[in-house]
Structures are given as C-alpha cells and as structure tokens.
Amino acid sequence: MRQVHHVGRCFIMAAMMAGGTASATTLGIEGTAFTVDDKPAFLVGMSYYGGLGAPESFIEADFDDLTLRGFNWVRVWATWGAHDRNVSAVDSQGAAREPFLGKLKWLIEQADKRGIIVDVTLSRGNGAVSQESARLTSQAGHLRAVETLARALKPHRNLYIDVGNERNIRDPRFVSHEQIKALRDRIKDIDPERLVTASYAGDMSREEAEEYLLRSRVDFLSPHRPRNAKSPWETAEKTGQFFSWMREIGRAVPVHYQEPFRRDFSKWQPRAVDFLVDARQAREAGAAGWCLHNGSPRRDYQGARRSFDLRKEQGRLFGQLDGDEHYVADHVGRLVRARTKTWLALMDGRWHINGRVTYPDAKAEGLLMNVRMVNSVFEDRNDQTRPDGFDSDRNTDAFVAQIPDYVAHGMRAFTIFLQGGMPGYEGAINSAFTPGGELRESYMNRVQRVIEAADAAGAAVILGCYYQRQDQILPDADAVRTGVANAAHWILENRLGNVLLEIANEYPHKGFDHDILKTPDGIAELIRLAKATAPGLLVSASGIGNGKCDKEVAEAADFILIHFNGVPVEQIPSRVEALGGYEKAIVCNEDQKVEEVAARAAEASVAAECSWGLMLEKINQNVAFEFNGHKDDPVVYATLKGLTTPSER
C-alpha cells in the first residue's frame, strides 16, 4: 500500500522551531511572475522600513517569525530617517554611510539564510523621512546612491531595488521617467541581472503604465493602490486591467503590491479581513506579490510605530503589531497560497468565507452550520466484518453528489474523519493512518475528493484525525504525534484554505487506548503540535456529548468544539454560556437529535450564538450510509435553511 507524507520525529521537532536554512537565494522573473531559485514564487511580505536601526537580535527574531508564517519578502529602506533618527545606508549625496551600509549587507545575509527576498528602497524624502540628511536631494546624488548600493550588494541575489518610492507624487519624492531610466541604467551597468522598479502612488493609468514599461523600462510594476474601504475588493479587477494593458502595449511584467493600505493611517481603519481579501485578490488575479504594510500612527490613532521605528526602546516588529496585524501575519501566508477557491477565516469570534461573514443578515450570521459525514470516506479492511459488496469509492461518490444540496439548505461545513466513525457494528478497521502515523494514499484520495467538492460548493471541511476504537492501530504516543504532524502537513502541502483540523473525536471517550488522546493535557499538546506544523491552520478537538470542554483544551484550541448529543434543548443556552469566558467561537459539530427536536436544538444553539452540527446516526453514519441531501431529515433542513437565509433581524 502506497503511503504519503512521512514526517517523522525530526520533522516534529523542526516544526516547533522557527527559522530556515536556505542559502544563496536568487530572485528572478519568468513572464509575469517572480521566481525564487528558478521556481515560480508569490512574494508575501511585510514592511520593515526602519530595519537598519533595529538591534541584530530583533532582526533575527523577526525574520524567524516571518519564515515560520510563510513570509518570504521584506521591504527595507536604504534612506530612512523617521522619528528623528537617520539610519540610512547612503548619505544625501549618495555616498556609503556606515555602519548602516554594513548593517544592510548583514540584514540581507540573514534574509538569504531564510529564503527571504529583500526590497531595498530609495526615496528623495517625504513626511515620514523627517531627517533632512536622509533625503537624496539631487539626481546626481541619487545616481551615486544607486551606484553605491549596486556595487556593495552585487554578491547578494536575494534582493531588488526600488529606485524611487512613490516617484510620481509632486513633492520631494518626484522622479521623472527620464531620471528613473538613468537610475535603472546605472544599476544595470554594474549588475545587469539586478531587478529594478520604481513605485507609483495610486491607481496607475494606461498611459502611466506604458511610460513605465517602454520609457523607464523597469523590470516590474509596483503600484501603491488607494487606501479606502473599496480597495481590497477592487484589487483583482485592477490587476486584470494591468495585464490587459500589457497585452496591448506589447510588454508583460510582474505586478507587485509592495505597499497597500495599512492601519492607523486614514479615516478608514482596515480590519484583518480587509488585508486577507486584498492579498487573495492579488494572488487570484495573477499579481506577483503582496505586502502586509504597517507604520506609525497618523491622525488621532495611538498605535505603535511598527516598522517605522525599530530601535531597542520601541521593540521588535512582532512586538509592535496590533491584534488585527497579528491575525493577518499568522494566517495570510497560508491563505494567500491556498489553491482552493473557498477560504475560511475566524475573526472576532465570527466565521468568514472568502472574506465575507457567513449568512449575512440571517439569524445564523457569523456561524458555521455543519453536518457530520464522518463515514463518507469509510472503508473496512477487516474481511470478517466488511459489508458484502461495499465499495468505498462509490460511497464517497454518493456523498459528493449531494454536497450542493446540503449547502443549498444551509450547511457550510462537513465533518469527516481519517478514522471515520462508528459504522453501526464493531470490528471495522477504518484508518487513514498506518501504525507509524503515515497517511495512506488511497484513503487520502477519498478525503481529497470530498474537500474539492466542498470547495466547489463554497463550503469547508472539519477534518478529524483520531476516533475511538481505531487509535489502537498506532502503537504509542510518538506514532500519534507523527500522525497529527502528517495530517497538518498534508493540509499545508496541498494548500487547502477551506479545511479545519479536529485532533480527536470526543477525546475523553473510554474507547481511546492512548493517554495522549484521552487527557486534556495530551490533547492540548497535540493541538499545539498541529499549529506549529501548519501555522495559520485552525485547530481544535471535540469533547463528549455533554456540551463541555476542559480548560486546557479550550485555551489551546482556536475554537471550541462541543457535542450536544446528551444535552436537552433547554440546557443548550447555559452550556454555551459556561464556555463564553474563553472568548472563542463555539462550534457544536455533533448532535444526534432528529426532526422537530433537532430543529429546536438548532434554533436554541443559533440564539446562543453557537454554530450547530447535525448527526443523523442511523442515516449518514451507520451502514449502509445514505446521503440524500435535505431529504435525510426534511424537518431539520427546513429549519436550517430558515436560520441561514437573510431575514428581518
């Protein structure tokens, strides 16, 4: 039997450590995409403007945090003098300025070790650069500056140079296209392979794009799109417009969003979801890179200075980011690269699909209504117990065919398990895991089909690892850990943005053999392992059917998973209220009630702001596994449709 994704204990240890070991990282261009080491790469970056003023320990720690989260690019200014401190690598006449030019080379080396690309930006100055000595005051000085940098940085291949930040603005920043061309040519004379750009403030016109492409001859476009509430939802359209113009003009280059909107800047205060939408739109439309921009507060905002001031007294960048920025940093690397069209996010306790809150203007707004379909990927490798004529693939096909109908009646997530669920008889051998914790390809192929069908329907999958009666397949706790790491890595490697991970079904259940799967501390450890293996992946584990969750698990999990099987309808509100102190989204993903009682349970759960999950044990979970869409239980599905349909609230 072919196996996939052997992770092993070395991988587990590595997943818990930050940092990378890449060396000689090389940036290139192929068509309209960047390449890193000759492979197409989407650059996910973060502003690090005042990096030359940061202590070396700050830079190393920040770069490790970036690498761990899937970032591969930073923007550092070579002319930076914000907050009354000049940390520029060149002086106002373009000559080398130590120790900061040496610091820039060291920073680039640290980035190189981690596979990070560095944007080295120059500017003739603006309001953010308060030190006059940090401004390039003439074209002659500007030319000398690019020559200084081109020669000093020539050995390093993991960078490009932005010769003029927002060069179109008619203030000291302004640099004409003739001057841009001269700056570009000076760099290319010294280092012909160095990539060069010059950024533009605002939405560029076709005429301006043509000037960049044919007159300045930059290697790629770097537009800084407007900073307003419409901007994130317009990025795909604007990106497509660039490519349409390029086809007409006759030269196609990458489009790189190196400085989008940021927090604490304008009247519009973007939230985490806005950044995620902007990044996804950029990637989906074919852009080459995107940045989590950050900086000092303007207007009446009171936030930290962030990348604009990284001196010791201000703290390193990851210590200055606010809650929304931290959420984006934790999740954008995975979500922007996800190949699924459906992507799931959890912000402020509310679920979002593709950047929009679930069920807008419905009673269930912000919730994740779900149904338990754990045996849609079932198999039984025990010849003594397998039902006559049972075919695992046909079983999966039958479920997949009904996914659109389930979604049409309010479901936005399906729970499936790598060890299935109780099929109505004992003795089945049903596990995607081998004894060593590897994943079996034939099983994962069925899982993949369900995930892809859910994706096509705009829904998510709660993918569970371990089920009681099946963990005995793995001999010890180390094998269990390996299995968790493999499952998380499989989600990450397959770039699945619509998948949540559930470590174990009803972890206190006596049907588990291994202590690590039936104790709160053990489950909390496995949750942390999964999160370390796949940063940004949302992970939890479900309790037994009493609607409760242990403190250790609730604190480790991204959201709280509970079962309502044994909870009377009238007690659902109090069970939800008891978990409210954790300030996390609460999801029931198993309630075995049926018909009118199930309908009332769904209503009570929604009223308590808890997502609700249906389990039709005799229909969907027990042999012979029937999947009939909303006809599985017309009463409860009618109620679910009503709860998830926009209405007067």
Image (tube, rainbow, N blue to C red):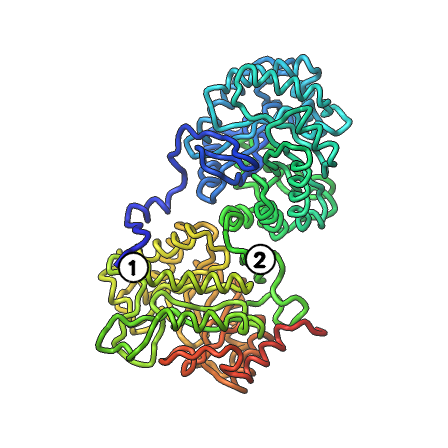
Residue that appears at 28% across and 65% down: 515
Relative to 574, is 536 above or below? above
Does the CB distance between marks 2 and 1 fall below 8 Å? no
Residue that appears at 68% across and 44% down: 238
Residue that appears at 69% across and 40% down: 225
Give the number of callouts. Answer: 2
Q: Which residue is mark 1?
A: 480
Graded by Cα atoms within 10 Å as few (under 14), some (14 to 19) or many (20 or more), the crowding at tag 1 reads many
Q: Quadrant of residue 550?
A: bottom left
Relative to 68, is 546 above or below? below
Q: Position of residue 560 (x, y in %)?
A: 47, 65
Amino acid at the residue labelled 1 = Val
Residue in front for this viewpoint, 479 or 456 = 456
Q: Is residue 156 left or right of 603 when viewed as pictured?
A: left
Amino acid at the residue labelled 2 = Met
Where does the C terminus fall, quadrant-wise? bottom right
Q: Which residue is mark 2?
A: 347
Q: Position of residue 215 (x, y in %)?
A: 69, 24
Give the Cα separation between the discs numbered 2 and 1: 30 Å
Q: Secondary structure at mark 2?
A: strand
Q: Position of residue 57 (x, y in %)?
A: 45, 32
Q: Residue furthest bottom?
A: 596
Q: Secondary structure at mark 1?
A: helix
Graded by Cα atoms within 10 Å as few (under 14), some (14 to 19) or many (20 or more), the crowding at tag 2 reads some
Residue in front for this viewpoint, 218 or 567 = 218
